[in-house]
Amino acid sequence: MSWSMTKQSPCYVCKVRDVAEIMQALTIARMYGLSVITHGAGHSYTDAALNTDGVIIDVTDMRRILSWDPQQGIMQVEPGATLRDIVRVATPDCWWPPVTPSTADATIGGCVAMNVHGKNAWKYGSFGEHLLSLTVLLASGQTLTLSPISHPELFRAFVGSAGLLGIITSVTLQLQRIPSGYVDICVQPAASLGEILRIFQEEQAADYLEAWVNGFASGCCLGQGIVTSATYSAVYDDASLQIPGPHLPEQFKGRLARWIGTIYRPAVKGSVRTANGVMYKWSKCWGRKVIRQRSLFRSTYYPPAVFTTYRALLPQGTETFQAFVPSALAERLFNEIIRRSQENNFIPLWCIMKRHRQDPFLLSYQVDGFSLEVNYQVDPRTAQQLRKMLLELMDLVIAAGGRFYLAKDSLLTDIPYRRSVGDTAVETFLHLKQMYDPEMLFQSDLFHRVFQTSLR
Ligand SMILES: Cc1cc2nc3c(=O)[nH]c(=O)nc-3n(C[C@H](O)[C@H](O)[C@H](O)COP(=O)(O)OP(=O)(O)OC[C@H]3O[C@@H](n4cnc5c(N)ncnc54)[C@H](O)[C@@H]3O)c2cc1C
């Protein structure tokens, strides 16, 4: 066990190697009257894994694969194992995580605690739907193994509870059979959001669907974008089942990415506008229904160098606004989000659309519908106005029955959150928190922002 301090906000960080060390960290935190939150890879865009003036328990060294059954595709892992760790073991046996976000470096504990989704959310639901069981450490020091059958209520509450009910110490997952490590990709241009929705409907047989929307396109071109569908390829070869290594050495790629980011920084908007236009034209040239084969790994996960470029390109960071809305209202609301952004001169640098379905979890953000993720460049001089506009849009989305995702949304506070997920869900969650964590040991900055006023 080792202790340190975070750089940005003052938190004590305790890096643990096993459950015994977690117990010791909890004892020390209690002795000093400090609250605690678990920390995975820190890939949430928000304050979910931060605990200002409290303790962060970093479980990233608890990353063993505890068991693997290549016949059944069942794997048990420690919470700090990453998706990359899992696919490295499972892919050679033709298994793959049924639900995965776009980063391979998220931990499995983090994926459960935020109940992540992927580009197949309308078909395979959210991460929690593929869990066989979870072992959790409660504030009382008791260890429980939860499954959808043994403890249905607590299981449904733990998944997606952002680490506020206890610490996940192991996860048993059901993986999905894949015919090979390739996907067949098809790219289609769409002239409007309506056309994107129509293509999503037509391409329901695909395994993955995602639309990139050009935030710069306005007027009659508003909502123009590209839909990419991917289907597991039937073409098999052994090489496809190995996790591809980097084409170039990581260090060189990192330096190159930083250099590209720094060069383009002064002209970021102009460069992204041009890139958007070129991509749209390229998608038209690609030719409808032309299918290309690509590595499943590379088509699922962003390479780490992309983040280095973003950081160099956008040193003040980005603000993300991801609205999940019912199908019938998606076109109108998404058009409104893009149109208002443009009117207020906050042109979204990149926008991603996905399709979703409801899931059974207590604090679920999933709806039967679509999500649009809009990313803005942050400029400290206009950050207040951007926030004001996004809060107005948030109101609009919630009034329409929409929801927001705690891993990516930094704007939600208790009242809009209650309006979006419902009083009953919040009250049930707080009741369970009172039952399993009566002294409020587990707290985070997100907890104070989204839940605490509800407790007063
Ligand atoms: C490039 C990028 C792409 C992304 N794409 C997607 C996407 O497509 N879909 C999507 O859904 N998300 C996406 N995300 C978000 C990301 O997948 C989630 O935020 C995920 O939770 C990150 O995992 P982590 O290990 O970094 O967790 P952290 O960010 O460290 O923690 C997240 C939450 O989990 C809790 N937690 C972590 N470990 C445990 C544990 N062992 N026990 C209890 N609680 C725990 C923390 O307290 C915190 O509340 C993306 C993020 C990035 C950076």
Image: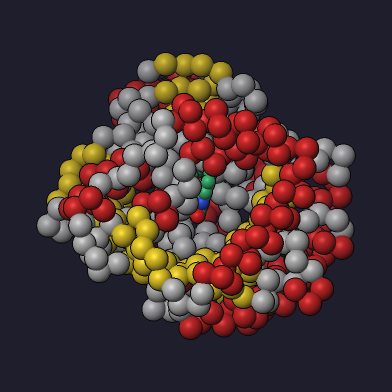
Q: Which is more toward the observer, 342 or 20?
A: 342
Q: Is residue 140 left or right of residue 149?
A: right
Q: Which is more toward the observer, 305 or 369?
A: 305
Q: Is residue 99 visible?
A: yes
Q: Is residue 114 left or right of residue 343?
A: left
Which picture quadrant has residue 401?
A: bottom right
Which picture quadrant has residue 214?
A: bottom right
Depicted 126 relative to depicted 77: above or below:
below
Q: Which is more toward the observer, 355 or 93?
A: 93
Q: Residue drawn at (58%, 22%), measured in percent from left and top?
A: 6
- Picture coordinates of residue 46, whole percent (x, y): 61, 43
Q: Residue drawn at (58%, 56%), measured in percent from left and top?
A: 405
- Picture coordinates of residue 451, whole percent (x, y): 63, 48
The quadrant in which the N terminus is found is top left
Toward the front, the furthest residue is 285
- Picture coordinates of residue 282, whole percent (x, y): 59, 65
Q: Residue drawn at (46%, 22%), measured in percent from left and top?
A: 14
Q: Is residue 156 left or right of residue 213?
A: left
Q: Is residue 418 visible?
A: no
Q: Count all numbered tags in the image, as a single digit.
A: 0
Q: Which is more toward the observer, 106 or 236?
A: 236
Which picture quadrant has residue 379?
A: top right
